[in-house]
Amino acid sequence: MFWDYDRDSYPDMLFPAGGKLADKRVQGLPSRLLRGTSQGYRDVSGEAGIDVVRHYSHGCAVGDVDNDGFPDALITGFGGLTALEKPG
Amino acid sequence: MTGRSSIVTVESNLDDSLWSSSAGWGDLNGDGTLDLYVAHYVNWSLENNPPCATTGSRPDVCPPRRFDPLDDVVYFGSGEGVVRQPDERMWSGFWRQRLGVLLVDVDGDADLDVYVANDTTNNFFISTMAAEGSKSRV
């Protein structure tokens, strides 16, 4: 998904990574967040905490849920939802 | 990490342990705040995983229709976040295996409608009439 979470006019990219069935468990894989900059894309998954697997991920949707003018994101999936927001 | 350039995963009140396939944001009730529609797939789990096989008798996951669909959930916005709708039955009963959802004014009546793409069954369209607080399905 393309969005501009920091509103710097460079599109950012969010990749829900899905998961797998292994060892009789549903295992998610770490999603990725790439921040667009004037020099290209930088992997900020760790900074955003999105590299921590919370669930098997499927889709994502963008909306400014806290009404602060910056778009937030929600990742759907098997067994949970993950919210991404700009820190207050 | 702080500042305009950061974004982080946050704890939220979105308590949903079901199989959510997709979601859409939009002002569904016309109150000026953002609402959230979460579409769910089926009630498959490792505990509910009956044996099925392909035509070649190779073990496989059962097809979607073998499982019960799950109700979708709508969270209504407060301007600072979203809260689950008290009466969830309002949006339940559209029994399908949902894959994707779009919130868009399909019928051109100046409010958001819900269009859901389903797996192996017909898609459906929920026409909302926010001013009257009601909806209908097509």
Image (tube, coloured by chain):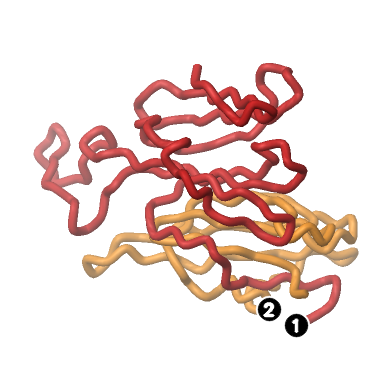
Chain colours: A orange, B red
**Parent chain of label 2:** A
Q: Is residue B22 visible?
A: no
Q: Which residue is tagged 2?
A: A47
Q: Quadrant of residue A37?
A: bottom right
**Parent chain of label 1:** B
Tell me the residue at 27%/49% (across/down).
Answer: B44
Categorize mark 1 by other alpha carbons within 10 Å: few (<14), some (14-19), many (20+): few
Q: Which amino acid is tagged 2?
A: Glu
Q: Position of residue B85 (x, y in %)?
A: 53, 48
- Above or below residue A11? Residue B96 is above
**Image side of residue B126 versus residue B108, left or right:** left
Tell me the residue at 61%/72% (across/down).
Answer: B10
Q: Which amino acid is tagged 1?
A: Met
- Above or below residue A6? Residue B104 is above
Tell me the residue at 39%/60% (across/down).
Answer: B17
The N terminus of chain B: image quadrant? bottom right
Spatial separation of the CA atoms under disc 1 and disc 2:
7 Å
In front here: B54 or B125? B125
Could you say whether the residue bearing mark 2 is in a helix, strand or loop?
Answer: helix
Q: Position of residue B111 (x, y in %)?
A: 71, 27
Q: Do tags 1 and 2 sit on the same chain?
A: no
Q: Quadrant of residue B88?
A: top left
Q: Position of residue A46 (x, y in %)?
A: 63, 78
In front here: A3 or B60? A3
Q: Which residue is tagged 1?
A: B1
In front here: B112 or A75? B112
Categorize mark 2 by other alpha carbons within 10 Å: few (<14), some (14-19), many (20+): some
Tell me the residue at 48%/23% (across/down).
Answer: B124
